[in-house]
């Protein structure tokens, strides 16, 4: 089977060389034909996955049949749910996943694939429930402390500034960017105050925010 190797390592070049050698040796034993090698090198806190994204694009074009990785967490470091979603996505487009470090992760075997997805999906569900419980507990703690949830309210001064900007001909997006609020909030302020673009007073000049209010 045509195979793509994916590595993700730190800036240690020796680590990359060791992984590649081990994965290529493993591929030979399994009669995998290595057609592509994708390697992302992590640097500090950077999460650049350019090579990974290129690999997924190539997978969609069926340029290979199998992705060989060092370990399951190389597919995603955002938790089990993301990993399961990635494996399922690859399987749907006809690309299997094999892990060097985890022999049970081999979706080239249909029975093993089905069992694996059931088990990993169960773990992913448990992970989602755990995250949900932590979120709820955090919200309850904030409520007990008497703190308000959500974004802090925007001041009347900011609202007036928004209307002044609109009155001088600024667009919604430009006004939002200027006062550092969302585009949707500017639209909301405009509706709340009954402001209409082009409204003018008797002198044929645009109304200011104070007069609109």
Image (cartoon, rainbow, N blue to C red):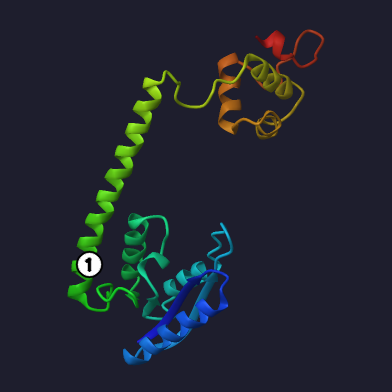
Q: Is residue 150 left or right of residue 101?
A: right
Task: Tell me what residue is drawn at x 28 percent, y 72 percent.
Answer: 105
Task: Tell me what residue is drawn at x 45 percent, y 69 percent.
Answer: 56
Residue farthest along the right direction in this orientation: 203
Q: Position of residue 182 (x, y in %)?
A: 59, 32
Residue position for label 1: 116
Image height of 30 relative to 133, above or below: below
Depth check: 28 or 88 in front? 28
Q: Is residue 165 left or right of residue 89?
A: right
Label 1: few (<14), some (14–19) or many (≥20) C-alpha neighbours in 10 Å: some
Depth check: 56 or 13 in front? 13
Task: Tell me what residue is drawn at x 21 percent, y 75 percent.
Answer: 110
Tag 1 secondary structure: helix
Marks counted in the figure total: 1
Image height of 168 relative to 204, above or below: below
Q: Position of residue 106 (x, y in %)?
A: 27, 75
Image height of 125 relative to 111, above or below: above
Residue 71: which quarter of the image? bottom left
Quadrant (top left/top right/bottom left/bottom right) for the N terminus: bottom left
Residue 168: which quarter of the image? top right
Quadrant (top left/top right/bottom left/bottom right) for the C terminus: top right
Q: Position of residue 100 (x, y in %)?
A: 35, 78
Q: Is residue 12 left or right of residue 201?
A: left
Q: Position of residue 123 (x, y in %)?
A: 25, 55
Image height of 85 relative to 52, above or below: above
Residue 64: which quarter of the image? bottom left
Task: Tell me what residue is drawn at x 39 percent, y 65 percent.
Answer: 73
């Amino acid at each position: 089977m045509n195979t793509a190797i994916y590595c993700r390592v730190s800036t240690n070049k020796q680590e990359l060389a060791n992984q590649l050698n081990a994965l290529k040796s493993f591929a030979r034993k399994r009669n995998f034909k290595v057609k592509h090698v994708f390697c992302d090198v992590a640097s500090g806190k950077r999460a650049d996955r350019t090579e990974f994204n290129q690999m997924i694009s190539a997978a969609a074009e069926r340029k290979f049949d199998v992705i060989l990785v060092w370990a399951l967490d190389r597919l995603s470091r955002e938790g089990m749910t993301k990993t399961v979603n990635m494996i399922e996505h690859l399987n749907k487009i006809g690309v299997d996943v094999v892990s060097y470090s985890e022999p049970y992760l081999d979706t080239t075997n249909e029975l093993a694939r089905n069992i694996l997805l059931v088990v990993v999906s169960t773990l992913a569900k448990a992970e989602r429930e755990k995250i949900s419980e932590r979120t709820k507990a955090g919200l309850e703690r904030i409520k007990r402390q008497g703190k308000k949830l959500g974004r802090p309210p925007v001041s009347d001064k900011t609202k007036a500034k928004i209307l002044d900007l609109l009155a001088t001909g600024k667009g919604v997006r430009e006004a939002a960017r200027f006062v550092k609020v969302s585009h949707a909030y500017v639209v909301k302020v405009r509706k709340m105050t009954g402001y209409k673009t082009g409204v003018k007073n008797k002198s044929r000049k645009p109304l200011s925010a104070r007069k609109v209010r």
